[in-house]
Image: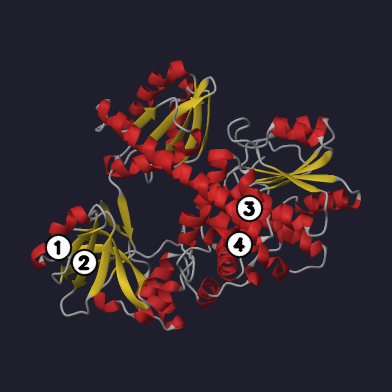
Amino acid sequence: MRWKLRSKPNQEKVQALQNALQVDEIIAALLVQRGIETFEQAKSFFRPTLADLHDPYLMKDMDKAVERIEQAIANEENILVFGDYDVDGTTAVSLMSSYLRSFYPNVATYIPDRYKEGYGVSYQGIDFADDNGFSLIIALDCGIKSIDHVVYAKAKNIDFVICDHHRPGDVLPDAVAVLDPKRTDCSYPYDELCGCGVGFKLIQALAQNRNLTVEDLVPYLDLVATAIAADIVPITGENRVLAKFGLDVINSNPRPGIKALIQNLKRSVLTITDVVFVIAPRINAAGRIKHGNYAVELLTEFDLEQAEEFASQIESLNTDRKDLDKQITVEALQQIIDNEEQNRFTTVVYQEDWHKGVIGIVASRLTETYYRPTLVFTKSGDKLAASARSVKDFDVYNALEACSEHLEQFGGHMYAAGMTLKEENYDKFKEAFERVVSDTIHPDLLIPEISIDSEIGLSDINPKFMRILKQFEPFGPQNMTPVFLTKGLNDTGYGKKIGSGEEHLKLFVKQNNSDSFGAIGFGLASKKEISDNLNLFDAVFSVEENEWNGTVSLQLRLRDIQ
């Protein structure tokens, strides 16, 4: 692990904020690092309100979208709500269809089949709309590059309203309305919304048009918070407001579908981390293993007993997903060893029977063992398809672009991408990708980095400090859980390896004459000798509450020791 201590923020700004908020210097510095420099900014950060949400009509084409939907309702047209099969797409479809159906019955949903239709708006979906008398399609979390599909639909007298958050191409689809805060000609104040977030702005505008307030829409925010968590968008601005109020709904009065997923969890309060690791994978499993419709059925069901049946089906799909993920990861790691590729700059593996729905997860798993740009291929029709995952600060999209002569198509962004190629080009591409990465990656990037916010002493950690840290939630990109460095620790002699395979490390640490803190390091058992015999060591960690037998104590979640 490479430890990187963030540079100290401007001391004058820290001092001014410390005085304004009456907090200690560590807290003030954490806030300034997150771009919060004034009392008003801190107030919005710690006490977000629904009034902080922007007027939806500031988004380009919002007026056109509302006008066309209201026209469809007035004319009793059939409306098809179309969305991607991942969490962002299925929550967005559930949000939009639930809202419209609350006052208009002629609404249906459509999620494309991951394997037969692939990502985004499909010709098959448009044909379904045509065959079943739909004259308006609302596309969510997709559509921004569906130029030809919109033309195809128009020829069948079907209009499109597009709600997307992906980066547009040079040409926009000729839809009635294209809602996307990343449009270069859109002056909407916040451009980091997820697809479900853009969908929420549309129902907010529709609600305003019907003299409803944003408070009336709070019950839909459990869906929006789930999408924000799953899509790894920054937890800043509007996303922070939507995530905060959405988490409140999840914890107090979630829709039956979400309640059915979480009711057996032994946690009093769910955090954004629980959404990422408990709710999102289960919703995603539907589209990965079977069909995204299973997720929409669950999230739009208002009878708890029926929702529990749907949740049971999805739990079964998630179990299948985990089994596949585990099996394929083992096979891929063995392939690397068999091919003697442990010391390459890249991981590129292929097996024709690997399940396409989990190769992205497997790619992420492989980077945990071999920290380097990783591609996992499987057979898809008459071609090979792959998911790519990168490492911090290396642009895998640019690397793929440099090898694109061997590819049929590819797309994505800096850290994740997808591609297809002809099977006969696999070996040539694999070597070209290795060459490009080896020529362009800095050796430091092949060592995992821990970004450290601040160096503190154990004496700085107390219940008041923790109470304020908890108010930094919800955590996520651009507001990650604070990570601290403390030097000169020693274990009090009770350290041990724990877990069924003794892979984790449990310590009780002190610094000089400080109080003792429990510390847990998952996967760090191999480093126990560093803490043996009262040796002094340094630790990187976050601070968390540990609940045991009804007693809550502060605990260090170790990231690394040395």
Label 3, label 4: how many angstroms apart (C-alpha)? 13 Å
How many neighbours does mark 1 have within 10 angstroms: few (below 14), some (14-19), or many (20 or more)?
A: many
Label 3, label 1: how many angstroms apart (C-alpha)? 48 Å
Mark 3 or mark 2: whose residue is earlier in sequence: 3
Q: Residue at x 73, y 61 (%)?
A: 204
Mark 3 or mark 1: whose residue is earlier in sequence: 3
Residue 68 visible in this rendered orientation of the protein: yes
Which amino acid type is marked by label 1? Answer: Ser
Q: Nearer the viewer, mark 3 or mark 2?
A: 3
Residue assigned mark 1: 531
User: Could you tell me residue 95's position as x and y percent?
Assistant: 68, 55
Q: Quadrant of residue 127?
A: top right
Residue assigned mark 2: 507
Mark 1 or mark 2: whose residue is earlier in sequence: 2
Give 388 or 18, whichever is nearer the viewer.
Answer: 388
Give 327 or 456, whichever is nearer the viewer.
Answer: 327
> Judging from the image, what secondary structure is the residue with disc 2 in?
strand
Q: Residue at x 68, y 60 (%)?
A: 303
User: Could you tell me residue 435's position as x and y percent?
Assistant: 33, 26
How many neighbours does mark 4 have within 10 angstroms: few (below 14), some (14-19), or many (20 or more)?
A: many
Whether the residues at callouts 1 and 2 have beta carbons within 8 Å, the answer is yes
Give 261 or 429, whichever is nearer the viewer.
Answer: 261
- Left or right, residue 58 beside residue 471: right
Residue assigned mark 4: 222
Residue assigned mark 3: 298
Which amino acid type is marked by label 2? Answer: Leu
Total marks placed: 4
